[in-house]
């Protein structure tokens, strides 16, 4: 299963690292890994919709745009709400933080595929009508991004997000076994966790791949990170994590750490 997954992810992501910013690959990796899945309390309302909130590096919120987005699309998160950064996109002069899944509607590739005979075709999958309920924050810099740490970014986001009192444990809807508390706080996935715990620890994955193992058991890989940076595979059977593997240096690199799979 893993070899097929590796080839698929390599094909999907192999050309994704033409860096636009002045940051080095290592600096980018540290920012993405250090901020993805982080929790914070909102200080201002966040709007639904594609544009989200715009924050300048000088600490000023684009109030006019914010009110326009809220009026048109509604509020995704009110002030003093616990939210999670679910994706980080570093661009040339701005960093876009996806909040609670973002405000853009996402579709699967197969929703655009139709099959049939002659002139009669129909979609192979039903397109979802679920409206995104998340938001985004765009942190805009006056010039090319350079020499930036996770702590720096959190300071820049301080006018809109409070990271200090937040705990990922609060985002899980049911009691968490004590053995997983530390792992979630340290942003690690472990065998035995369920999907909600993994999301609390690592956020939403960049990719999901479903396959059958050699013995016919259906598994799903949640894939975090993108080559040439470290890539983490979290493998589920049903709702439970059965294996976790980290590849240092991206796919094809050495396995930095591996949590033994659940014996069958």
Image: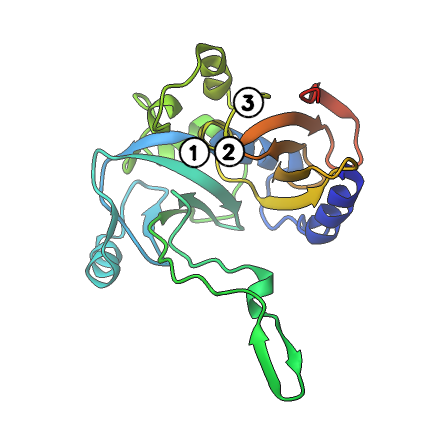
For the residues bearing labels 1 and 3, Cβ distance under 8 angstroms: no
How far is disc 2 from disc 1 in space, using C-alphas? 7 Å
Residue 149 visible in the displayed image: no
Comparing labels 2 and 1, the label whose residue is closer to the camera? 1
Q: Which image quarter: residue 169?
A: top left
Find disc 1 in the rendering and name its residue. Answer: 153
Give residue 229's quadrant in the image: top right
Which residue lies at the image location 48% right of the left edge and 16% below the top edge? Answer: 180
Q: Dot 3: few (<14), some (14–19), or many (≥20) neighbours within 10 Å?
A: some
Secondary structure under badge 2? loop
For the residue pair 38 and 89, the one nearer the viewer reads as 38
The foreground one among 225 and 9 is 9
With respect to residue 28, does 120 lie above or below? Answer: below
Left or right side of 134 for 214: right
Task: Identify residue for label 2.
Answer: 148
Question: Where does residue 139 sit, x and y in percent of width and height?
Answer: 40, 45
- Residue 49 appears in the figure: yes
Question: What secondary structure is marked by label 3?
Answer: loop
Circles 2 and 3: CB atoms closer than 8 Å? no
Foreground: disc 1 or disc 3: 3
Label 1 vs 3, first from the N-terminus: 1
Please report whichever mark, 2 or 3, sits nearer to the chain's N-terminal start: 2
Cα separation, mark 1 vs mark 3, equals: 22 Å
Q: Which residue is mark 3?
A: 188
Q: Is residue 215 left or right of residue 93?
A: right
Q: Residues within 10 Å of mark 2 (few under 14, many from 20)?
A: some
Please name the residue shown 45% across and 19% down the image.
185
Q: Is residue 218 left or right of residue 64?
A: right
Alpha-carbon span between mark 2 and mark 3: 24 Å
Residue drawn at x 51%, y 46% is: 89
Determine whether label 2 and label 1 are within 8 Å by CB. Answer: yes
Question: Where is residue 186 drawn, in percent x and y?
Answer: 50, 18
């Amino acid at each position: 299963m893993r070899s097929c997954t590796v080839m698929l992810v390599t094909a999907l992501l192999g050309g994704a690292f033409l860096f636009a910013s002045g940051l080095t690959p290592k600096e980018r990796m540290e920012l993405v890994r250090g901020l993805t899945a982080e929790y914070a309390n909102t200080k201002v309302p966040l709007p639904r919709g594609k544009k989200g909130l715009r924050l300048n590096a000088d600490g000023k919120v684009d109030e006019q745009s914010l009110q326009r987005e809220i009026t048109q699309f509604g509020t995704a998160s009110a002030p003093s709400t616990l939210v999670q950064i679910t994706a980080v996109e570093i661009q040339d002069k701005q960093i876009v933080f996806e909040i609670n899944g973002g405000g853009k509607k996402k579709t699967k590739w197969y929703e655009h595929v139709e099959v049939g005979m002659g002139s009669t075709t129909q979609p192979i999958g039903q397109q979802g009508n679920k409206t995104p309920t998340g938001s985004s924050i765009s942190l805009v810099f006056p010039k090319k991004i350079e020499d930036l740490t996770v702590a720096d970014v959190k300071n820049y986001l301080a006018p809109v997000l409070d990271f200090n009192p937040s705990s990922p444990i609060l985002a899980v809807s049911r009691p968490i076994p004590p053995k997983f508390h530390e792992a979630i706080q340290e942003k690690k996935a472990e065998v035995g966790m369920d999907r909600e715990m993994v999301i609390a620890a690592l956020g939403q994955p960049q990719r999901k791949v479903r396959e059958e193992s050699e013995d016919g058991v259906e598994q799903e890989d949640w894939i975090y990170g993108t080559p040439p940076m470290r890539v983490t595979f979290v493998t589920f059977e049903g709702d439970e994590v059965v294996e976790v593997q980290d590849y240092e240096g991206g796919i094809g690199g050495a396995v930095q750490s591996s949590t033994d799979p659940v014996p069958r």
